[in-house]
């Protein structure tokens, strides 16, 4: 995007002969304060984190004699802990992303129809999205209460469960339970983004599908899905990035437990640093998390690039 | 838009048509209940006599005689102080990031220059980073510069996370303002910055307000930084204060939920009032 031909935008008439040099510097001067902020508080800590990850010891300011090279990384890759954290992160992310996209898609398809009360229902969908994460953690903590929680009550009265489940004490249920909290929060975003994409699908395509006698499933697979595929792809990446970031709800609900069943990378970093005081190890895990996020970000950019070249 | 029900191919007879509408409503209702039920449950629980919460089956309706719970909340918990801290951090972070974003977004929107692509990539990258990745080095940094246990640390850390979002919102809006308007200003002898101040910024007032509000609520709900960089209880923000109730388990559930109501209400109201513009705008921004 740098080598665009000079467009109207750049070449502006410069009547009172402003300083040429100033004009060349101006765009950089405008963006500089932002980069001082982001550089100091995001980019510089990333480098610092890399340095800290090369030191052992428990001090926040690493001493030279604590330099251990890559030992933190070697240790991590030999410990089952990291593998477990990666596995849990992948399951959490995959579960959240797939469920949110599926539920969001179902809602978007429903909301395509014009029906009385549609605006109200749409408004209702935005409510989870406006709820602060900590508040939703509190609410779900109470809803998942083993004895008096609404979740157990609903599942018991509908006959799905015969006894109450202690969701956050069960190594097999804790992860699905926190996944549901995240799905609840982000599926409305998916629904609204997909609804916007659906309305942009060419109407005439549906008509010709009808003429060809295609059923609803065939129409969805061959007309709707290809039309919204770029949006779905980017939504998946966005949700994946959000899930990788998620710390608040999991920390409040389970602190990574029971027996590390919900110990995603974000939680593990925090636990190593501020519970076990293994700063170097925490920084090393953070670096691994950063590499994963960067890989996904690059994937996002590649997809966006492909989309741009497709649409123009 | 015409009603677009599944397989409108064959013209449905009366009964099938009605069945289809009923099916549609049942599914819509299921989605709405899933979305709203936790919020309803928060309200019901907040307005309930303490002893009525530990019964089976649970009471499904609010008990309006218990509305005084909100008075008890403010009397027994330091939540007023937490809310003030959240307000200060949210306003500070939103203000800082919007001011810097106006200039940065103008630069990205109006000029083509070397490094522009790289700069916008770096901005987007910072948005993708899990904030826990930054927590350890930022903690070390804030300790060095003596900002641990200050609201300033939270304002700075939050604004750095919010800024890339507000830049994107403002850039998207600046892109829609025709350059011809600015050219007129330049011809009349305005400097580039004068054009930004006298023409572009007034035209962008709605976007600036939206960016501020979005940044504010982002910081309002933030938890990880607030938990780590501030340990002094008098400086706690609401998110940390509310979360601390779960650790101690001595806070009655109805108080917990009334606190959640107070914390959630401004944010949900904001999203409801502006839902159409906001969500579609954010969606477009996220997809762009």
Image (cartoon, coloured by chain):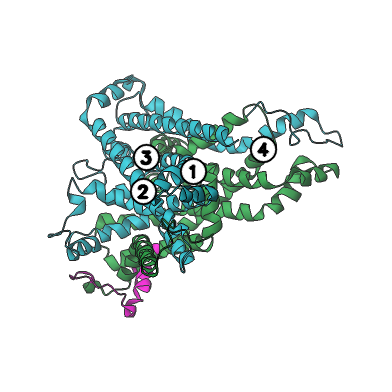
Chain colours: A cyan, B green
Q: Residue under mark 4: which chain is it in?
A: B
* First reached walking from the N terminus: tag 1 or tag 2: 2
**Is residue B66 within the magenta segment?**
yes
Eye-nearest disc, 1 or 2? 1
Q: How many marks?
A: 4
Using residue A278 as the reference point, say whether residue A109 is left or right of it: right
Q: Which residue matches tag 1?
A: A227
Q: Quadrant of residue A15?
A: top right
Q: Which residue matches tag 3?
A: A244
Residue B92 seen from this side: no
Range covered by the magenta-colored residues:
B53-81
Q: Quadrant of residue A285?
A: top left
The image's mark for residue B231 is none
Using residue A261 as the reference point, say whether residue A59 is left or right of it: right
Between B286 and A305, which is closer to the camera in this rendering? A305
How far from the left and from the top, in percent, is residue A142? Answer: 26, 61
* First reached walking from the N terminus: tag 2 or tag 3: 2
Q: Residue at x 64, y 27 (%)?
A: A2
**Badge 1 local density, few (<14 within 10 Å), some, or many (20+)?**
some
**Badge 4 local density, few (<14 within 10 Å), some, or many (20+)?**
many
Q: Which residue matches tag 4?
A: B107
Q: CA distance from mark 2 to mark 3?
A: 19 Å
Q: Residue under mark 2: which chain is it in?
A: A
Q: CA distance from mark 1 to mark 3?
A: 28 Å
Label 2–label 3 contact, CB within 8 A: no
Eye-nearest disc, 4 or 2? 2
Q: Which residue matches tag 2?
A: A102
């Amino acid at each position: 995007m740098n080598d665009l031909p000079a467009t109207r935008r750049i070449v502006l008439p410069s009547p009172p002969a402003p300083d040429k040099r100033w004009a060349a510097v101006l765009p950089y001067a405008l963006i500089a304060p932002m980069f001082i902020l982001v550089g100091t508080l995001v980019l510089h800590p990333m480098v610092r984190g890399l340095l800290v990850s090369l030191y052992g010891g428990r001090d926040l300011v690493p001493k030279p004699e604590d330099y251990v090279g890559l030992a933190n990384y070697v240790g991590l890759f030999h410990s089952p802990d990291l593998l477990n954290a990666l596995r849990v992160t992948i399951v959490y992310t995959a579960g959240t992303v797939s469920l949110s996209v599926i539920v969001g898609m179902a809602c978007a398809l429903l909301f395509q129809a014009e029906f009385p009360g549609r605006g109200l229902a749409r408004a209702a969908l935005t409510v989870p999205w406006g709820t602060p994460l900590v508040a939703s953690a509190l609410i779900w903590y109470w809803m998942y209460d083993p004895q008096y929680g609404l979740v157990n009550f609903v599942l018991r009265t509908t006959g799905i469960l015969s006894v109450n489940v202690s969701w956050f004490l069960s190594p097999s249920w804790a992860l699905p339970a926190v996944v549901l909290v995240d799905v609840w929060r982000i599926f409305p975003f998916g629904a609204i983004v997909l609804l916007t994409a659906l309305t942009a699908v060419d109407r005439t395509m549906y008509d010709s599908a009808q003429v060809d006698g295609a059923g609803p499933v065939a129409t969805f697979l061959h007309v709707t899905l290809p039309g919204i595929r770029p949006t779905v792809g980017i939504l998946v990446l966005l949700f994946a990035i959000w899930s990788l970031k998620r710390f608040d709800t999991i920390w409040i609900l389970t602190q990574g437990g029971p027996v590390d069943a919900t110990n995603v990378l974000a939680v593990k970093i925090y636990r190593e640093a501020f519970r076990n005081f293994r700063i170097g190890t925490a920084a090393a895990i953070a670096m691994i998390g950063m590499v994963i996020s960067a890989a996904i970000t690059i994937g996002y950019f590649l997809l966006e690039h492909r989309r741009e070249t497709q649409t123009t | 838009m015409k009603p677009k029900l599944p397989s409108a191919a064959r013209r449905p007879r009366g009964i099938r048509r009605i069945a289809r509408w009923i099916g549609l409503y049942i599914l819509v209702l299921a989605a709405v209940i899933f979305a709203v039920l936790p919020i309803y449950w928060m309200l019901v629980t907040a307005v309930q006599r303490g002893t009525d919460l530990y019964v089976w089956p649970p009471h499904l309706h609010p008990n309006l005689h218990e509305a005084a719970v909100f008075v008890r909340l403010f009397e027994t918990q330091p939540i007023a102080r937490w809310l003030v801290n959240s307000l200060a951090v949210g306003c500070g972070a939103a203000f800082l990031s919007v001011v810097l974003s106006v200039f940065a977004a103008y630069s990205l929107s109006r000029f083509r220059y070397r490094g522009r692509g790289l700069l916008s990539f770096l901005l987007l990258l910072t948005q993708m980073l899990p904030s826990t990745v930054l927590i350890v080095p930022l903690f070390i940094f804030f300790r060095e510069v003596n900002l641990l246990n200050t609201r300033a640390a939270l304002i700075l850390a939050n604004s750095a996370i919010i800024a890339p979002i507000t830049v994107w919102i403002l850039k998207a809006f600046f892109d829609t303002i025709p350059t011809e308007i600015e050219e007129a200003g330049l011809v009349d002898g305005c400097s580039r910055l004068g054009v930004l101040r006298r023409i572009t910024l007034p035209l962008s007032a709605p976007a600036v307000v939206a960016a501020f509000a979005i940044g504010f609520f982002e910081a309002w709900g933030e938890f990880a930084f607030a938990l780590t960089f501030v340990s002094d209880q008098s400086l706690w923000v609401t998110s940390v204060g509310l979360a601390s109730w779960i650790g101690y388990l001595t806070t009655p559930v109805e108080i917990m939920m009334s606190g959640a109501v107070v914390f959630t209400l401004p944010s949900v109201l904001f999203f409801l009032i502006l839902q159409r513009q906001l969500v579609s705008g954010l969606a477009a921004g996220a997809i762009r």
